[in-house]
Amino acid sequence: MAKNLKRREFVRKCAEGTATVLLLSTCGPLPSTAEASEKSKAYSPKNHLYGMGIQVNKCIGCGSCVRACKIENDVPREPYFFRTWVERYLIDSDLEAHVDSPKGGYDSFPPLEEEEGGDILRSFFVPKLCNHCDKPPCVQVCPVGATFRTQEGVVLIDEGYCVGCRYCIQACPYGARYMHPEKHTADKCTFCYHRITKGLLPACVEICPTQARVFGELKSPNSPLHRMMRMTELQVLKPALNTEPKVLYSRLDGEVR
């Protein structure tokens, strides 16, 4: 019982978190404080099932999402820890894929040198993050129950229980977790849980200049994500693993790993 109470307190504190002032100044207009407060009061976890869609053809590799995530969630910058990052895929004339992600895409991507780009047939960018699986391996291996799945389908970590054993980091097939260098606990994307429970968007979605990221309800027909699911064929990363991810990709190239 004490464990469940502590976990509920952890989720409550996440929901009560406030957005960083710097991010607010760069993201454009957000719902008013009164509106967000009203949504927060009426919030009921059982009424939600969240997911994210990523339109690969719209991502320009600008790195805005990576920078916004670090600011919003106080992610350590050095030596390059990430809750979300962007990879660049280069397909050469032999149809071989070459992948780079300098600093996780934090500073965008440098242009290709002439000798590098000479035999490149095409290139594209792929944002990555925790997939918030319905069958998360990280939850299964955690020996103390610090990693758990909420009613809304968001996978979170209770820092008060995490013992830093790294089992979840090793179990994640998407490489989406890291060990926080100061807290010495596992860390990862939370879909900006403290924002979405107030009716706001995750920081990476809010700031994306091309709307490559789409966040919303998986079951609500009025959700932008649900509309995307109806209109576009979507794929998930590593489908053979049967983790049932809730991060869905459109126009995902077969070379993406």
Image (cartoon, rainbow, N blue to C red):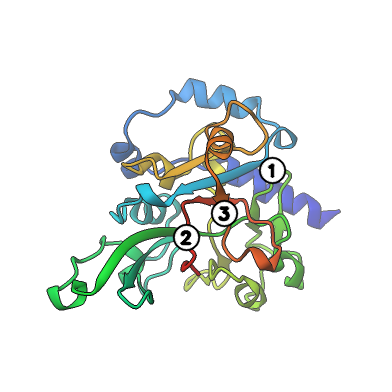
Of mark 1 and mark 3, the one earlier in the sequence is 1
Mark 2, Cα crowd under 10 Å, few <14 / some 14-19 / many 20+, is many
Q: Which residue is labeled 3 in the image? A: 235
Label 2 – label 1 distance at C-alpha:
20 Å
12 displayed left or right of 24: right
* Position in image of residue 239 (x %, y %): 64, 63
Label 1 – label 3 distance at C-alpha:
21 Å
Farthest left residue in view: 114
* Position in image of residue 242 (x %, y %): 71, 63
Label 2 – label 3 distance at C-alpha:
13 Å
* Position in image of residue 236 (x %, y %): 58, 57
SS for callout 3: strand
Front residue of 164/123: it is 123
* Position in image of residue 229 (x %, y %): 57, 39
SS for callout 1: loop
Q: Which residue is labeled 2 in the image? A: 128
Q: Which residue is labeled 1 in the image? A: 152
